[in-house]
Image: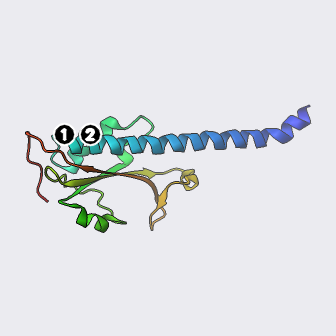
Amino acid sequence: MAIEFALLSPVYISLLSGIMFFMYSTVQVANLDYVAYASATEIRKNTSVANSISDFKSQVVCLEASPMLDCDKIEVGVMSRPNVFGLQDWFGQSFIGQFCPGNAGEIVMVSVRYNLDGPLRKFYANASQTEDDNRFILSRYLVVREPTVVGEGINC
């Protein structure tokens, strides 16, 4: 009995560790998607009083992030267009660090990126990779900004 346990226990432990890591990474992606959704909803409703990307991150994004996401590793970008004709220019573009929530009726994209670190970052199946071998998870949401009585927005 002890020999069978010694032979099979590494396989079972590896299998359980892999399942736990997959669950953890899936929950991180789901949490990041929720953060992007909640941030886009704040922009859509114009309920945030943020005037810069750092204010938006601290007042909206970090408050919505779960404890599984370290706020220091989250980067945010907000960009707007007056109509749908400029949307194809956003494909493959990164506007992390920019804050342009636009005005009422404009299309706004909120992009939230979570930088991964640690020895297990190479095993994230859904992570993108940069030139310097950094890996990150990216989530984006498009919304149309609602007309509001309060505030006119920011012209970009």
Q: Residue at x 24, y 41 (%)?
A: 42
Residue carrying label 2:
60
For the residue labelled by badge 1, is the local secondary structure a helix, a strand or a loop? Answer: loop
- Find out whether the residues at labels 2 and 1 contact each other: C-beta distance under 8 Å: yes
Instruction: Estimate the spatial distance between the alpha carbons at disc 2 and disc 1, rounded to whole Å.
Output: 7 Å
Instruction: Give residue 67's position: percent from left, percent from top.
Output: 42, 34
| Image-based side of 19 in relation to 136, left or right | right
Tell me if residue 66 comes above or below residue 82 in the rendering.
above
Residue 27 at x, y percent in the picture? 50, 40
Q: Quadrant of the C terminus?
A: bottom left
Figure quadrant of residue 50:
top left
For mark 2, does the 10 Å Cα neighbourhood hold few (<14), some (14 to 19), or many (20 or more) residues?
Answer: many
Give the residue at x 55% y 52%: 124
Q: Residue furthest top?
A: 1
Query: Along the horizontal axis of the image, is 138 left or right of 94?
Result: right
- The answer to whether residue 5 of the structure is visible from this angle is yes
Quadrant housing residue 89: bottom left
Task: Name the residue beneath numbered marker 1.
Answer: 48
